[in-house]
Amino acid sequence: MAHHKSAKKRIRQIAKRRLENRYHGKTTRNLIRVLRTTTDKAEASKQLPLAISRIDKLAKRGNIHKNKAGNLKSKLTKFVNGLA
């Protein structure tokens, strides 16, 4: 257990950031899951920019690697373009 005041504060800060990171990651994964289950092209086209924006924010924050973000965006875009 931490004994210094600064170390105790760091523990509090890390816990708060971890909760925020988990929230953003989970909501983005849910958004991607909903997008992948969509069969209507018009609806998917509306959801795609929101999903891409969320993925970019995760990459910017460092929650996911920038290459993973690029791969996700590419696959989602291919999926939406392939809908009839």
Image: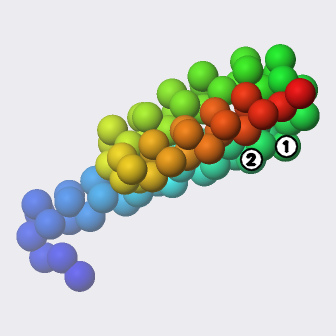
* Residue 24, horizontal then vertical, whole percent: 52, 44
Q: Nearer the viewer, residue 49 or 84?
A: 84
Tell whether label 2 touches label 1 (CB within 8 Å): yes
* Residue 65, horizontal then vertical, whole percent: 37, 53
- Left-right relation of 52 to 39: left
Q: Nearer the viewer, residue 41 or 24?
A: 41
Judging by the rendered image, the residue that carries numbered circle 1 is 37
Q: Amino acid at mark 1?
A: Thr
Residue 37 appears in the figure: yes
| Quarter of the figure that contains the C terminus | top right
Residue at image location 74% in from the left, 31% down from the top: 80
Query: In terms of image quadrants, where is residue 38?
Result: top right
**Is 55 located above or below residue 41 in the figure?**
below
Number of numbered callouts drawn: 2
Gap in Å between the C-alphas at discs 1 and 2? Answer: 6 Å
| Quarter of the figure that contains the N terminus | bottom left
Residue at image location 39% in from the left, 50% down from the top: 67
**Is 20 located above or below residue 51 in the figure?**
below
Colouring chosen for the image of the structure: rainbow
* Residue 78, horizontal then vertical, whole percent: 67, 37
User: Which SS class for mark 2?
Assistant: helix
Q: Amino acid at mark 2?
A: Arg
Residue at image location 50% in from the left, 38% down from the top: 55
Residue at image location 64% in from the left, 33% down from the top: 77
- Left-right relation of 84 to 22: right
Q: Which mark is residue 79?
A: none
Residue 63 appears in the figure: no
Judging by the rendered image, the residue that carries numbered circle 2 is 33
Q: Nearer the viewer, residue 74 or 61?
A: 74
